[in-house]
Amino acid sequence: MNELDALVASASQAFSAAGTPVDLENAKAQFLGKSGRITELMKGMATLAVDEKKARGAVINTAKQAIEAALNARRQALADAELERQLRSESLDVTLPGRQRGEGGLHPVSLTLERIEGIFGSMGFSVAEGPEIETDWFNFTALNTPADHPARSMHDTFYVEGGAADAPLLLRTHTSPMQVRHAVQHVKRHRAAIDAGQAMPEIRVIAPGRTYRVDSDATHSPMFHQCEGLWIGENVSFKDLKVVFTDFCRTFFERDDLVLRFRPSFFPFTEPSAEIDIQFASGPLAGRWLEVAGSGQVHPNVVRNMGLDPERYLGFAFGMGPDRLTMLRYGVSDLRLFFDGDMRFLRQFQ
């Protein structure tokens, strides 16, 4: 075995003994580095004749290529060994069930709102939406509740910056402002026909949404939901209110034995006015009267604020609390549970 064959064998043995990439690079430096054995052999050719340099250079290059081949083979072997180790340590059992993303669900109050919209939609009512930051005029004055009206004390609320001194802004205390907002836009669209004495298409709309008042206990929340309803036409009466709301309640609770009571009351935007109570014939609430809504014939002043003649157009309005309806439907005793964010409670409705 000549000198170069021995060098190749020595390099192969050193590379095979390297157990890590770092050890392998150190072994490489001994043979192929700037001060390595191959480099020293190349430097030694400086004193040789030209013909001898060609012959000597050829055999040294052959040895260098053999050493590089051995080096690359060991690098690949170490990489394969590392991959095998990772595969063993990070093995995946493909027979296990996959990790699925949990399915979400609607909030119980959202379920109730969808149910309300669906039932009234089947009766021909459309859904109106409006701003939660409302003007004093739409929230109070247009609904026959001027600044000096005692009923305003029942609507202690949150005022916000940005309004004028004579037109303050507030978080709406009910969704009733949408009655006037929707009616005003409806009348504008049909003003020419109304002025010509033609019949105006009826206004039949519900307005669900969030409302705000300074109130908080087991049955009240500073933020709560309301759903207002409005039906205005030339031949709409209190009888229609009773039929519509009775049908709604019996459909919502899926109880044909549900009894409704319209109890005289007062609201500044309706005259006459009535609280609506319901009574279940069976179940844990059997025999008890439960208040679920306020209602009445739309007050003539409100009809005027809509841009209509109260001598020709009349109708009814009602307002109910979807939060309370949700509590009754699912047997929840504390309103605050809906807004605490406790997933244990909310998952029951998914």
Image (tube, helix red, strand yellow):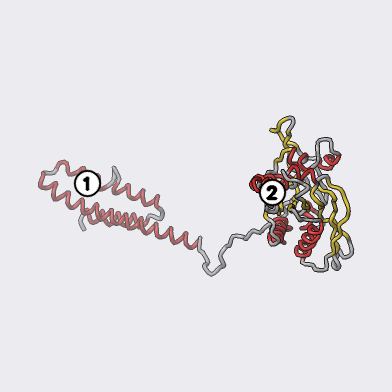
Q: Position of residue 214 (x, y in %)?
A: 80, 42
Pinpoint residue 23: horizontal percent, then vertical percent. Answer: 39, 51
Q: Is residue 122 visible?
A: yes
Q: Residues within 10 Å of mark 2 (few under 14, many from 20)?
A: few
Question: Which residue type carries mark 1?
Answer: Leu
Direction from residue 45 to residue 139 in the image, left or right: right
Query: Which quadrant holds the N terminus?
Result: bottom left
Of helix, strand and loop, which one carries label 1? helix
Report the label total: 2
Q: Which residue is mark 2?
A: 197
Q: Residue furthest bottom?
A: 95
Is residue 187 or residue 95 the one in the foreground? 187
Q: Nearer the viewer, mark 2 or mark 1?
A: 2
Q: Is residue 200 left or right of residue 278?
A: left
Q: Nearer the viewer, residue 184 or 116?
A: 184
Residue 171 lies, in percent from the top left, at 73, 41
Q: Residue at x 66, y 59 (%)?
A: 105
Q: Residue at x 73, y 41 (%)?
A: 138
Mark closer to the chain start, 2 or 1:
1
Crowd around label 1: few <14 · some 14–19 · many ≥20 (10 Å): some
**Residue found farthest to the front:** 196
Q: Say what amino acid the circle numbered 2 marks.
A: Gly
Q: Is residue 247 above or below residue 191?
A: below
Q: CA distance from mark 2 to mark 1?
A: 114 Å
Residue 41: which disc? 1
